[in-house]
Image (cartoon, rainbow, N blue to C red):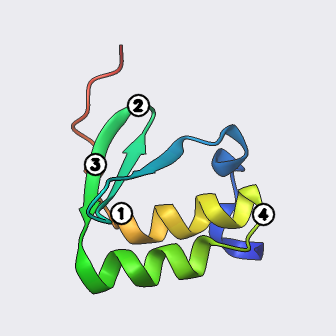
Amino acid sequence: MGEEDKRNKLDESPFTFEVSKDKNVFIFWRGKRVTILKEKVSDRFLERIRNTDQKEAQLIMAKVTGNFKRGNEKNK
């Protein structure tokens, strides 16, 4: 894993995902939906995440969501 998670934020498991009946993948960050993957992209995602451990799965979801945080989010 190395350099990707220097602050160990992925140890908190902020990402989750759900698969719908039509094979769309909804990725959530701390309970908020941030990305929807459809068709070939969702198939590739499910194939990549199938045999991974929790931390690797978190890293895959973080990379798939991209840079959705821009610094203007409000803390609750």
Position of the N terminus by quadrant: bottom right
Give whichever of 52, 76 is nearer the camera: 52
Q: CA distance from mark 3 to mark 2?
A: 9 Å
Residue kind at label 4, given as amino acid type: Asp
- Is 34 drawn above or below residue 76 in the view shown? below
In the image, which disc is placed on residue 34?
A: 3
Where residue 45 sits: x, y (%)? 46, 76
Chain-order first, disc 4 or disc 1: 4
Count neighbours of disc 2 (C-alpha within 10 A) and say few if under 14, some if 14 to 19, many if 20 or more.
few
Residue that sits furthest to the top in the current view: 76
Query: Which numbered disc, 2 or 1, marks the residue that appears first in the sequence?
Result: 2
Q: CA distance from mark 1 to mark 3?
A: 7 Å
- Please identify, in this view, whether the residue under mark 4 or under mark 3 is nearer the observer: 4
Coordinates of residue 64 in the picture (x, y in percent)? 40, 70
Q: Residue at x 51, y 46 (%)?
A: 15
Instruction: Name the residue beneath numbered marker 4.
Output: 53
Dot 4: what SS? loop
Where in the figure is residue 52, as x and y percent of width and height?
Answer: 73, 70
- The label shown at residue 65 is 1
